[in-house]
Image (cartoon, rainbow, N blue to C red):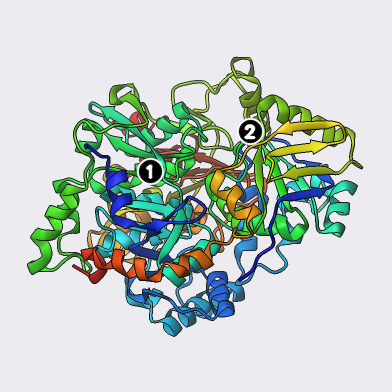
Amino acid sequence: MSLAQITQVKALALAVPGDDIDTDRIIPARFLRCVTFDGLGEHAFRDERTGPDGKERAHPMNSAQAARIAAAKQGVMVVGFNFGCGSSREHAPQSLWRFGFTAFVGGSFAEIFFGNSTTLGVPCLTLSKEDLAECDAFVRANPNVEVTVDVANLTVSAGAKSWKADIAASARDGLVNGKWDPIADLLEGADSVAKTAGGLAYVAGK
Amino acid sequence: MAKTLFQKVWEAHTVRKLPNGQTQLFIGTHLIHEVTSPQAFGMLRDLGLKVKFPQRTFATVDHIVPTNELKEPYSDPIAQEMIEALRKNTKDYGIRFFDTTTGTQGIVHMVGPEQGITQPGTTIACGDSHTATHGAFGAIAFGIGTTQVRDVLATQTLALSPLKVRRIEVNGKLAPGVYAKDVILHIIRVLGVNGGIGYAYEYAGTTFDGFSLEERMTVCNMSIEGGARCGYVNPDQKTFDYIKGKPFAPKAADWDAAVARWASFASDPGCQYDDVKPFKAEDIRPTVTWGITPGQAVFIDEKMPALETLNAADRQTAEDAYAHMKLAPNTPIKGTKVDVCFLGSCTNGRISDLREVAKYLKGRKVSPSVKAIVVPGSQLTAIQAVHEGLDKIYIEAGFEWRGAGCSMCLAMNPDKLVGDQLCASSSNRNFKGRQGSQTGRTVLMSPLMVAAAAITGVVSDAREVFKV
Ligand code: SF4
């Protein structure tokens, strides 16, 4: 399986502010009633975007900027802290990715969301609190300026600005080397797997 | 060298180091359900791969099962499609399925322990964030995404990085009317909803020593709400007694060896933790959430926080929370009108929960303004409860007695809040829209507090209502 080497993502960005945004908000449970991930993109942040009366609410995902990202199928979402907490549903990053987001920049990410995104080839980079505030402000003020999420060099930059970014070393390594989906590596270890399994009595039901 | 349980389990299951520096970790037990597995089986088929250890994968159906119609086809055709997809996948790949027709179906985190599949010193993974529940037995149990479900199906391993270990030590005796649920809500309130990122939580201390396995499960269950990917309690005699005789427990000839092995996984005296956080049981009172994250909680006799007392980041979330909950800062939560009461979920849908509430419910009536439902977490729990006559006590009091499943914990089945109804709930998440209505409101609490709210029609102190 050969995968793209994701060294950087350069695209328009959308700020979706707020801390502790959980995956129930990103994709409400009723859209989990499905056996494929197809079509999830249009439901990203559904209940934040549409009121109970069915009318559109003021939400970044309803903006012209979001529409441009959806059309380009490329975009950077700038979020707050602990983004993607709660349920492990991979439907959450899947819906945002299918909507058009190909990178996330935030203060911190919930671990399962981070892992799910990485295995999709979608980098989640973190900035310091101050830098994130600056990046967020920049993105809102300059919707036409593309943001560069540089996974290889660990920076996020836009216009004349550049911020020092971070990502777990293993995720960075996987992304830049085109090995962000671990399945090939895991399959390669079959002999060692059999050995480990053989040393565990409970695997044999004992 | 003295080691933690986490380190010992990690070492025993390490297959090798991967090129990216992560560990290829063997997953001894894989649990699957209908929501997060179908896409994984799809990926497996696309890649032309087989299930590597079908005998170490166990399936159940919980999220979408209606709890008030037991006959198929279900009125929701998508729910029907999902259960049938799981039937087909488990049949195609030779996986044991605890189906609705077997009398053993239930919430995935109840089925593992009930069957004796959940054992100390093992690794467990499930495409569900509350997998940490199994840590109550001294297992290292991870919630994983769907692509990782594929990884485990295909290789019985995961690519993971080790976690730091934080020991959360609670000592002392809980006051009457204070439960395991209050302990974990309190811990999350103090350490924060993201305080556990990067950590496994080891719950210890005399309070945990005294807890039953079911109480330990309630606490471990909500580790993820505190940001921790897994949580565990060291195995002890209570753990072994609980497992003994269960269908998948080691049989007579293997039992003693299994117990010795299990005991050896407990954290060694003098081992190093990355962090230690002490709590006193006496400080904990019945706790309820007032906001839209599980960390936004107060003791029942406290006022909800005034905005001025919060730091800038918390304040923003709090403003959002107060607006959604239609509650006012700096006022008591006690006395808030309740519309729905939900007793169930993988946090508090076990037999001990149903027994404890039933003890106090006898002779009491649910307020006419409240819809109250009780959903046993598993068919075995439901059967046991009926055997003990608990169903009658609930029905007599005015609760609806339902079949087993997740139900109104996340409302993927027909049990949903309507409009801005407020639900007193024994579940684990109070996120916006969690219980099926975009404007619905959830107040998390212990099962007995749910019962107190059902009777009075308002958020109440169970200790007063039931003279605990
Ligand atoms: S009861 Fe709730 S939290 Fe538990 S598995 Fe079901 S939906 Fe998830």
**Label number found at residue B447:** 1
Judge by depth and name the residue closer to the eye, B331 or A1: A1
On the image, which quarter does residue A139 sit in? top right
Q: Can residue A59 be seen in this view?
A: no
Q: What amino acid type should be assigned to the residue bearing mark 2? A: Ala
Residue most toward the top? B308
Q: Which residue is drawn at 44% across and 66% down?
A: B152
Q: Say which quadrant the N terminus of chain A sits in.
A: bottom right
Query: Going by the image, does B38 lie left or right of B282?
Result: right
For disc 2, the chain is B
Q: Quarter of the image for the C terminus of chain A: give it.
A: bottom left
In the image, which disc is placed on residue B265?
A: none
Kindly report the distance in space between the C-alpha atoms of the residues bearing marks 2 and 1: 23 Å
**Percent coordinates x, y for residue B214 in the rendering:** 28, 48
Q: What element carries label 2?
A: helix
Could you tell which of marks 2 and 1 lies nearer the N-terminus?
2
Is B284 in front, or is B209? B209
Residue at 54% across / 81% down in the picture?
A: B48
Q: Residue type at mark 1?
A: Pro
Q: Position of residue B467 (x, y in %)?
A: 30, 30
Figure quadrant of residue B306: top right
At 32% from the left and 75% from the top, the residue drawn is B55
Return the x and y of residue B66 as percentages of the image width and height.
50, 67
In this rendering, the answer to whether B64 lies above or below B454 is: below
Question: Is residue B70 shown above or below A95?
Answer: below
The residue under label 2 is: B321
Answer whether residue A80 is visible to the viewer in this image: yes
Residue B291 location, x and y as percent? 57, 34
